[in-house]
Structure formats: structure tokens, C-alpha cells
Amino acid sequence: MMSAARDALADADTLLVAVTQLTSTSPEMLSDELLIETDMATTVRLYAQNAKEAGLSGVVCSAHEGSAMKSMKLLSVTPGIRLSGDGANDQKRVATPALAREWGCDFIVVGRSITQSPDPIAAYRRCLLEFLGAQQTIK
């Protein structure tokens, strides 16, 4: 399936990524509900290896796996990003934008920390500053 998707996009200037494990998946869910016997880190690496072998650009994974994806030379798209002080809600493997940067993530996906903020524009700018680093100018 991943190879077919890659082939379909062969002429497009597009990054193709595959999902590893959702950031709402806990280690208990992995074993008890999904019946996967390996730990989360191993499972994500195995799924990422499948994506790499299929010729994809990267994977969707938690920030916790960002450095592993970097070592595999895969892009990482990381949801489950929360600003410090925000609740994790249903997410099990969350990180701040700054931690995502530190752990080598390439892209972040931020939802509730912006959409549920009393000042979404300020929250968005804060996410950018934390992820890009304070040396960046935000307009």
C-alpha cells in the first residue's frame, strides 16, 4: 500500500508519510487492545522501517521518537504537541514544541493548545518561537 502510494506520487513534488502509532496510544493499549507484543519504541521503529523500505519521506510519530527517526534518516511529523501547562487530554505521549525541536522533530502538529487558548494568535506565536528557537523573528 505504501509503495503504491509512493508510485502514484512519483511525478509530484510531495512528501509522503505513514502513521506509526497514534500519540493517544498508551503502552497498555498497544499490548492489551492492539495485541502488539513489542514495546512502543520498537513498534514505532519497525513501522518506520517499513515506511523507509517503501520509499516514503517520513512518518507521523510522537516527539518521543523524533531522534530515532532522525537516525533512520526519516522526516518526523509529530502531533500531541502541548504548550507547557496545557492538559494532555486524551493524548498519552505529548511534548512541548521546545522538546520536539530538541528531540529532532521536523514538523509539529498543534491543535488544542492553540484552538482552546483564550488568545489563539499568541499561542500560535509561542509554539513557533519554542519550535523554531528564540533566534527566529515571528511576524
Image (spheres, rainbow, N blue to C red):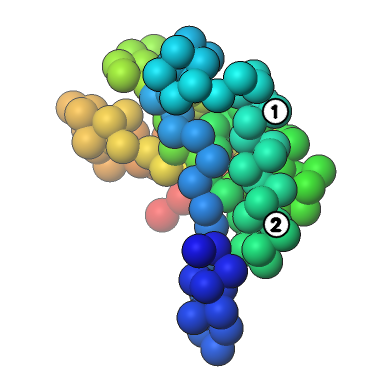
Q: Quadrant of the C terminus?
A: bottom left
Q: Is residue 74 above or below residue 115?
A: below
* Type of amino acid at the residue the image marks with label 2: Lys
Determine the residue positioned at 28% across, 42% down.
Answer: 121
Q: Return the residue nearer the eye: 62 or 26.
A: 26
* Location of residue 24 (image quadrant): top left
- Mark 2, residue position: 52
Instruction: Estimate how packed mark 2 is, as few (under 14), some (14 to 19) or many (20 or more) residues with alpha carbons within 10 Å.
Output: many
Residue 41 left/right relative to 120: right
| Alpha carbons under labels 1 and 2: distance apart | 15 Å
Q: Is residue 36 above or below residue 103?
A: above
Regarding residue 127, the answer to whether it shows in the image is no
Q: Return the residue nearer the eye: 126 or 23.
A: 23
Q: Whole-percent x and y of residue 135?
A: 64, 44
Q: Return the residue nearer the eye: 139 or 32.
A: 32
Residue 2 left/right relative to 46: left
Q: Whole-percent x and y of residue 101?
A: 63, 37
Residue 43 left/right relative to 84: right
Q: Which mark is residue 83?
A: none
Q: Residue most toward the right?
A: 71
* Type of amino acid at the residue the image marks with label 1: Thr
Residue 108 left/right relative to 85: right
Determine the residue positioned at 49% across, 21% down.
Answer: 35
Determine the residue positioned at 62% across, 43% down.
Answer: 47
Q: Return the residue nearer the eye: 24 or 121.
A: 24
- Mark 1, residue position: 42
